[in-house]
Image: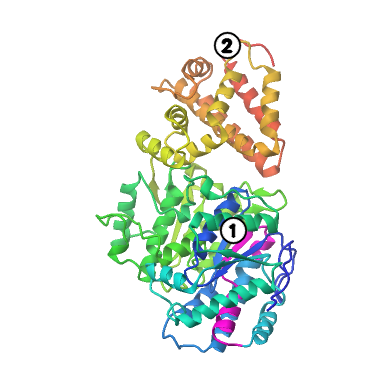
Amino acid sequence: MDLGQPALTGPSSPRGLNSGPARGRFITIEGGEGAGKSTQLELLATAVERAGIPVQRTREPGGSAGAEAVRRLLLEGADERWDAVAEALLLYAARRDHVARLIAPALERGVWVICDRFADSTVAYQGYGRGLPLADLMALHRFALDDFAPDLTLILDLPAAEGLARAARRADAADRFERLDRAFHERLRQGFRQIAAAEPQRCVLIDAAGERDGVHRAVLAAVGERLGIPLTPEAQDSGAVPAPRANPDLLGHEAAEAALRRLFERDRLPHALLLTGPRGIGKATLGFRLARFVLAHSAGELDPRLFDDGAGEGLAIWPDTGVFRRVASGGHADLLTVERAYDPRRRRLRGEIVVDDVREIAAFLRLTPAEGGWRVVVVDGADEMNRNGANALLKILEEPPSRALLLLVAHSPGRLLPTIRSRCRRISLSPLAPELLRRLLARYRPDLDEKQAEPVAALAGGSIGRALDLAAAGGVELYRSVLSLLDRDAGIDPAALHAFADRLARAEADESYRAVEELIGQLLARLAVTAAGRMTETSSAAAEGPMLRRLGECAPAARWAELREEVGQSFARTDALNLDRKQTILGAFFAIARAARQNRAAPAF
């Protein structure tokens, strides 16, 4: 059955939907029960994100609020609740809502959409598995979605017996389809294989019987060959950190976890929480951890056996539960994540969260919960909202609906409107302890020996996220370069500074540019502390103590603090307006030099 040829500039828009040019790519992952679709989806999505491409994870049936409601009708209840015709009609009702409300808008924004199952599953299950005529399913597809089809479909092939054995080992209960007999699943496998053979331009059949990383490499090879983008296998980075929504671990914040759980159990959880602390210490991970806990409660999945911590004081649930997998894949209908969106014109994330992003919250909270309980919103980077976005959020906080939870993650809460801060309960997270930071760095970057890891940890300021970024970008050497440019009695060497700025301004040097942006801000903060006479110890990263004392004495602490804010705004303005990065780097260094001349003579630059 031909569901439409792949459109390599983006799928065609279904009739009645927005028909603007789709710039994203639509990838579907298909296969029988237990083939590993959810696992491979998350691995692929992570690899695509590492390549700098934004990803929307989703699933079928489901993915949008309306489709999730249909999903419950389809998967729950007696095995013969619906006949094959009713199943097909329900699936396409859900699919149209899913495409219209989630998939097509994301593609038009330049986001890649990766979906666990799509139309091929209907052909395999209701056609090959349950005997509906393929021509009728084809007609139904064209009626509902016109010629909308994936750019690439990855079909994970696995013997039916092995797939059913894997599915039986999962923690969640079997659904209606998993309970069907062995013969059905044999037909299902053959159906997927025939789909792959009939449409080789769109479909790639992948042997899923091997180990996880081998399947992952085959998936990335197929995506690279078909869509022309090289992707790095996660297996090459054994210490890869899961995204916050998919991370089952949270270390160093046990007290905050326990406090949040007590609030929930006593029915005193506020409608809005402000999670604050330095960047990269686990604020978003805690937010998604709480979201999973609350949503699992709604779904009745809070069996005591699901908790990782023996004392039962935390918020952990087993990664094999349905709620965990739906949150990790971005497919939970009662969870909305708001963050900086991808700008397809500039081919990178926007510098701020705009008002249209925030308005999605109001529309989401007006929906009836798909799973009958809570609705949760995570705003990751609330301090990155522009003024209009902040005002839109304030209106929502002023009249929050019942059983709605807003989790605002903020690295710099002072940038938020005071009226927003006053309507949230604040949960402040502290930097990680040095020993814990070193342990995490060893876990995620086992290739670093102790001599290499120590200065990275010293520069990271208790943030594992920052430590990993610095390690990836060569942050220690970059910091030494920053210090050497400033630590000259004769002033900055213009030629050396221009060479340094030229290197950072290159398109391929984005990681280094971001690291230097953070390092300059950190240096100015250290200068302010030194000027105030409160610097008690210095980083071992670059023997910076003498230079900090010399420069710190050249201007009052308030001036260094003001300059940190000014330089930070300059970098933000460069991102927002797509200005020349080299000039921003030069401006930051010359501003530091001017401040240093406040109390001592120095040659002109």
Mark 1 vs mark 2, CA separation in Å: 61 Å
Q: Residue at x 46, y 56 (%)?
A: 246
Circle 2 residue:
600
Task: Name the image quarter holding residue 5.
Answer: bottom right
Q: Is residue 135 shown above or below 390?
A: below
Judge whether 106 appears above or below 286 on screen: below
Query: What is the quadrant of the N terminus in the image?
Result: bottom right
Q: Secondary structure at mark 1?
A: helix
Task: Identify the secondary structure beneath mark 2.
Answer: loop
Which contiguous range is marked in magenta? 105-132
Depth check: give the residue in front, 204 or 406. 204
| Quarter of the view holding residue 109 | bottom right
Instruction: Tell me the kind of residue under disc 2.
Output: Arg
Residue at the image point whose x is 64% and y is 71% from the top: 196
Q: Position of residue 460 (x, y in %)?
A: 46, 34
**Is 116 located above or below residue 390 in the figure?**
below
Question: Is-magenta flag for residue 572?
Answer: no
Say if residue 94 shows up in the picture.
Answer: no
Q: Quadrant of the C terminus?
A: top right
Q: Position of residue 582 (x, y in %)?
A: 70, 31
